[in-house]
Amino acid sequence: MSIHGPLSGQIALVTGASRGLGRAIALELARRGAHVITTGRTAGALEALDDEVQALGGQTTISPFDLAANDGIERLASVISQRWGRLNILVGNAGMLGDLTPVADISAKIWNEAFALNVTANWRLIRAFDPYLRAVRDGRAVFLTSGAAQSAKPYWGLYAATKAALEQLVTTYANETKTTSLRVNLVSPGALRTAMRAKAMPGETRTGQIVDMRGVGVTS
């Protein structure tokens, strides 16, 4: 059994696919026929996702590593180049909340870790995969942002700063590629029932939107 859908034959890469929104996105892309390359730090969670996708008749290639460490992104780009020579869809989803604390109290360690994952890793993704996204006529690059980028809410300074930086980076990239067939987008999904939101809002009643990408439009 195999899936024949609107994304059949396309190669998609989803970062932070081991749980939450990234997992839901990867699963939906597979449901629509894409071969999905998944990254995340938890190999077991990626393997569980692979089992679910295979049960549906879809395909994934798992790549467990820390996006913010060493040269994993560049090595993955080399593998994708050798195996497929192209990439149709890039979803930059991986991110971290960091500490919710006054700006003056943010530790240098957490500051650097948050920027490394939320901003620098996405720049490295762009740098590594831009040639392969341009090699197809329907390339799509999607990056996840948050309303926190504009809210300047007390104690959210670190997360807000990373998302604001990401938005400027991605918007500039979109402007640089608007005369090509590559389409670059930012998506702010709003409040979702994820582990990150549970950390940010520990007292919140769990009545928020469940992460489920069925019915959400994906450009093909």
Image (cartoon, grey):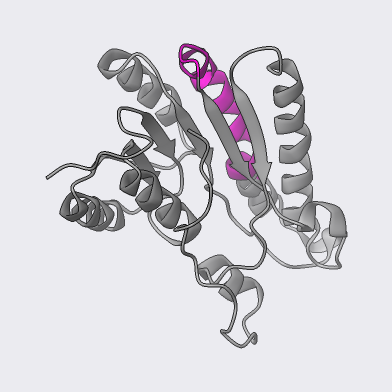
Say whether residue 162 is left or right of residue 126.
right
Q: Any magenta on residue 130?
A: yes
Asked if residue 212 is positioned above or below residue 126 in the image, the reply reads: below
Total count of labels: 0
Asked if residue 83 is positioned above or below residue 43 in the image, the reply reads: above
Q: Position of residue 148 (x, y in %)?
A: 77, 58
Asked if residue 108 is positioned above or below residue 212 in the image, the reply reads: above
Closest to the observer: 111 or 80?
80
- The rendered magenta stretch, by its main secondary structure, is classed as helix
Closest to the observer: 95 or 216?
216
Task: Tell me the quarter of the image containing the N terminus.
Answer: top left
Query: Is residue 151 something that shows in the picture?
Result: yes
Q: Residue at x 18, y 47 (%)?
A: 57
Q: Position of residue 114 (x, y in %)?
A: 64, 49
Asked if residue 180 is positioned above or below residue 12 in the image, the reply reads: above
Say whether residue 164 is left or right of residue 119.
right
Say whether residue 158 is left or right of residue 1.
right
Q: Position of residue 184 (x, y in %)?
A: 64, 29
Q: Residue at x 60, y 47 (%)?
A: 113
Q: Any magenta on residue 203?
A: no
Q: Quadrant of residue 45?
A: bottom left
Query: Is residue 41 something that shows in the picture?
Result: no
Q: Residue at x 38, y 55 (%)?
A: 18
Residues rendered magenta in the picture: 115-137
Q: Position of residue 79 (x, y in %)?
A: 31, 21
